[in-house]
Image: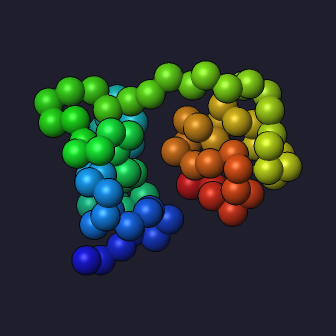
Amino acid sequence: MTRILGQPALDTGGFSLVLKTLETNPTPSNPANWRASFAVGGSPGENDSSRFLGDSFADLDSDSLSSLLKDARGSSDLDANSVT
């Protein structure tokens, strides 16, 4: 299986690829517009989003990007190298 740069291995655990931010009409041919589903097995025909429940202004990995911003971009605030 070909892996998309920055995405976890999607051939294990039952996660699927879903487009990020559908409301912006992303280009499906751009690998950066995809992420792993939040639910195992994906969510065919349903919303695949999650609510942000953390501290909006926290910067747990000290990379000068807030937790809320990193969540919105689909990256992790626990890893300074996970900027998408």
**x, y (%) of residue 23?**
34, 29
User: Which quadrant: the N terminus?
Assistant: bottom left
User: Which quadrant: the C terminus?
Assistant: bottom right
Q: Is residue 59 left or right of residue 16?
A: right
Residue 5 makes an appearance in the image: yes
**x, y (%) of residue 56?**
72, 25
**x, y (%) of residue 5?**
46, 70
**x, y (%) of residue 78?**
70, 50
Tell me if residue 35 comes above or below residue 56 in the rendering: below
Between residues 69 and 79, which one lies in front from this camera angle? 79
Tell me if residue 22 comes above or below residue 52 in the rendering: below
Query: Which residue lies at the image location 24% right of the left edge and 42% below the top edge?
Result: 42
Residue 19 makes an appearance in the image: no
Tell me if residue 23 comes above or below residue 76 in the rendering: above
Q: Is residue 48 left or right of residue 50?
A: left
Q: Is residue 3 left or right of residue 42?
A: right
Q: Is residue 37 left or right of residue 84?
A: left
Query: Which residue lies at the image location 64% right of the left edge and 42% below the top edge?
Result: 70
Q: Residue furthest left?
A: 45
Q: Residue furthest bottom?
A: 1
Tell me if residue 16 comes above or below residue 71 in the rendering: below
Between residues 29 and 35, which one lies in front from this camera angle? 35
Q: Which coloring applies here?
A: rainbow
